[in-house]
Amino acid sequence: MGVVTDDLSATKTEFSQLFGYEWGPEVGGEVAVTLPTGDRVVDLKCAFSITEPRIELVRSASAPLWESVPGIHHLGYWSDDVDADRDEFAAQGYGTEATRRAPDGSLFFAFMRSPSGLLLEFVTRVAEPGMSQCWAASR
């Protein structure tokens, strides 16, 4: 589950105080993405919870998709084939909000919005071992 916030530190503190969440390190940086308006570089910083259910807190960025909104921003899922999942969901009426290519040219992630407004993020399972270090218990 992803939450976009203007203040990562304050939101981490709030979730920790209210629900006992613990956090991995803040990670991220400039990421080249493709938006409906074209290619863009976005400075994306986030922190993942060590505590489950897993929460990703994303610092709001100067791109429409990553502006702070009340409540849950997106639901994230591992994908064995992001390109195929994007195509399948597009056939069901989902619109592509943003994508990022992996070095091999395949999609690394894709944000898809349902006709009712639900935002899903598909992330290549190839990234799971590296990303899982962001929520390892040892800090």
Image (cartoon, grey):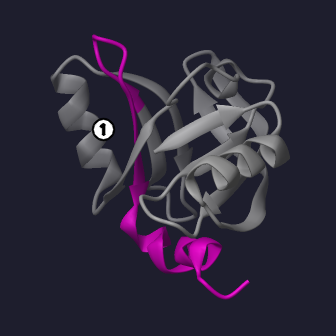
Q: At 30% from the left edge and 38% from the top edge, which residue is drawn?
A: 86
Task: Give, as a single range, the part of the protein colored magenta.
Answer: 112-139
Q: Is residue 31 visible?
A: no
Q: Which residue is the extreme one toward the bottom?
A: 138
Mark 1 secondary-structure assignment:
helix
Q: At 62% from the left edge and 15% from the top edge, which residue is drawn?
A: 37
Label 1 packing within 10 angstroms: few (<14), some (14-19), many (20+)? many
Residue 26 picture quarter: bottom right
The residue that label 1 is drawn on is 86
**Residue 137 part of the magenta-drawn span:** yes
Direction from residue 17 to residue 111 in the image, left or right: left
Total tally of numbered discs in the picture? 1
Task: Give the residue type at disc 1.
Answer: Arg
Report x, y in % for residue 132. Answer: 53, 75
Instruction: Say which quadrant the N terminus sits in.
Output: top left
Q: Which residue is the extreme one toward the front?
A: 18
Relative height, residue 27 to residue 44 (above, below): below
Relative height, residue 25 to residue 64 (above, below): below
Q: At 49% from the left edge and 80% from the top edge, which residue is drawn?
A: 129
Q: Is residue 70 visible?
A: yes
Instruction: Say which quadrant the C terminus sits in.
Output: bottom right
Relative height, residue 8 to residue 111 (above, below): below
Q: Closest to the observer: 9 or 85?
A: 9
Q: Closest to the observer: 19 or 22?
A: 19
Q: At 56% from the left edge and 52% from the top edge, which residue is drawn?
A: 19
Residue 94 picture quarter: top left
Report x, y in % for residue 2. Answer: 53, 42
Report x, y in % for residue 28. Answer: 76, 57
Residue 117 picture quarter: top left
